[in-house]
Amino acid sequence: MAPVLTVKDLNVRFALHHSTVTAVNDLNFTLEAGETLAVVGESGSGKSQAFMSLMGLLAKNGTVTGEALMGDVNLLALSKPALNEYRGRDIAMIFQDPMTSLNPALRIKTQLAEVLVRHKGQDQKTAERHAVEMLERVGIPEPAKRAESYPHQMSGGMRQRVMIAMALLCQPKILIADEPTTALDVTVQAQMLDLFRTLTNDFGTSLVMITHDLGVVAGIADRMMVMYAGRSVEKGTVDELFYDPRHPYTLGLLTSTPHVEERSRRLNPITGSPPNIEHLPRGCSFHPRCAFRFERCFAEVPPLRELENGRAKACHYEDKLVYEESAA
Amino acid sequence: MSTNQGELLRIDNLSKSFSIGGGLFSKPLKLKALQDISFSIQRGETLGIVGESGCGKSTLGRCILQLLKPDTGRVLWLGTDLAALPGEEMRKRRRDLQIIFQDPQASLNPRMTVGEIVADPLRSLMPELSAAARRQRVMEMMEAVGLQPEMINRYPHEFSGGQAQRIGIARALITEPKLIVCDEPVSALDVSIQAQILNLLSELKEQFGLTLVFISHNLSVVRHVSDRILVLYLGRMVELSTGDDLYEDAKHPYTKALLTAVPIPDPKRARQRNIDALTGEIPSPINPPSGCTFRTRCRYAIDLCAQKRPPLEDLDSGRLVACHRWREIDEMAGMGSSPA
């Protein structure tokens, strides 16, 4: 089956006063039908900007080049009105803070119904009925009553459910979720991840989960893509990357993450800090923090190379990744 | 575990509420942030305090430091009631009690150099030091937290989040405190930096013989650093025990639910796990449920739980649980229905 989304040579640049920064650099990936792809990275890795650019949501000083193909249609080449037809209907995005995405002055049902009126041409009554049904699907108790409320009358968890309901109203092919559970308490986060699993399954939606939390990735994703300083540095299935990471940054993220089920005495962090994308180091952007670097890493940017089974990594180092001191 | 035993701090029956809203014609509402909190902190240990939003964990940290005045109850430092100390005495005590905040950038004055920020507590708490001695100490402390002493004249904006948190830690350490309250010290940091700071805190704890109170919503982080862990829910203690007991054999249904909800960074384990997500959300602390505050989300709740508040029961060796039914639940789990 053809992928639902194919992204080719995606570059996102922002014009600053005296310079241009490249927030996303030559990104290539596909999203298969019905799969969940986790996009993992730390602040400044470009993980959010890459997907904001697909949705036409870049800040005014941002420009995007490359292709994002849904079928034969390149989302990046669409005019604004044409893109509006796709957004919400075929591809939807939700964010960390639902309050910033909901209109505080409109009732929940009005905001939800608008999507169906706009994209499906339903009349207001029908649309509102469908909106209430969807609220029920996402686990909102007393949906008919809650549909009458305003966003501020709901808790953070409920608002995030409303966002998910709104995003799924038209049963889009792709749902992009940018840190959707980061602001939520852990018990509510668990409910929400469960909801994502159920709904993507039921609707056959492909999910892109943008997150920094490897726990969330392990619980929900099929494949993952690790980003660092605007580039994709490793791609593969979740099991491949967790149990056999090939890029030193992926390994570093894993050994930095504390595990609730075991009390290891010491974490093995990555030294240094993520680079400022205005002044990227020469060669591989990760080399100043890398325990496996050698001369070549200082000079040449490693390209993303295909390994076996569709895995890929962008790293010059060929041997097995083993830290010199054991991580005991 | 801790090497030098002995009680450093005791919280005795502490309660704290806040008045919110209220106007000319309306009475303010009472938000009960903490109720009937009693526990002790041993010298040299790390006590983790966990709970979800509104459980009172930050308020508790601030009450320990006397940054907030409890309504009732006492905070005893080596047996002395801190609130009863005259101003000058309390000032001296402040040398021993320090805090590290969540947002490192926001907790540093942007107009002061790193040297001034780190030296600031010395000015008021150890005024007897000369300028040269202060500078010397600042440089030593910067070195101890992994900052180059040459950076002493730089300003906070020149530092990354992780480095800014190191500055905050140096400032907390400069008066040679005995106890530091760490209030979500790594929550605002990237994963790779978070691990650096956690390792740094454990090194400094050894080096300076510190006692730490580690407040966080992140149970994996708390598990990693803590000797004992206190779980709060809606301003009340639900369970207190050693980290291993808590994570391997939690007694309170809320603790159990909290632990199974924590995402595990291991795909195979994550798939095996039977996540039994807690339903509903945390009720408002302005109008908490009667009896056991957790009963509205507890699947074991019975009539008794609505009528009577469960007492905090001392199981053995200081392990505390507040649940009417923990024994029955324990037996049920033992009888085959496999624990998650």
Image: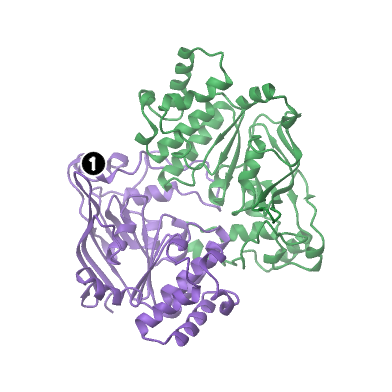
Chain colours: A purple, B green
Q: Secondary structure at mark 1?
A: loop
Q: Quadrant of the N terminus of chain B?
A: top right
The vertical placement of A59 against B183, above or below, is below
Image position of B25 (left or right of B145) = right
Residue B74 appears anywhere in the view: yes
Residue A154 appears anywhere in the view: no
Q: Write down the quadrant of residue B46 in the picture.
A: top right
Query: Number of marks in the image?
Result: 1
Give the residue displayed 71% in from the left and 56% down from the top: B251
Residue A274: percent from left, percent from top: 33, 44
Give the residue displayed 31% in from the left and 62% down from the top: A52
Q: Write down the quadrant of residue B97 in the picture.
A: top right
Residue B148: percent from left, percent from top: 37, 26
Give the residue displayed 57% in from the left and 18% down from the top: B126
Q: Quadrant of the C terminus of chain B?
A: bottom right
Residue kind at label 1, given as amino acid type: Pro
The vertical placement of A251 against A122, above or below, is above
Residue B87: percent from left, percent from top: 68, 24
The vertical placement of B45 against B290, above or below, is above
Image position of B11 (left or right of A4) = right
Q: In this orientation, which residue lies closer to the viewer: B48 or A172?
A: A172
Q: Residue furthest front?
A: B24
Residue A23: percent from left, percent from top: 26, 53
Please give the chain letter of the residue carrying mark 1: A
Q: In this orientation, which residue lies closer to the viewer: A266 or A228?
A: A228
Q: In this orientation, which residue lies closer to the viewer: B317 or A274?
A: A274
Image position of A64 (left or right of B307) = left
Judge the density around disc 1: few (<14), some (14-19), many (≥20) Cα neighbours within 10 Å.
some
Q: In this orientation, which residue lies closer to the viewer: A72 or A146?
A: A146
Residue at which label 1 appears = A281
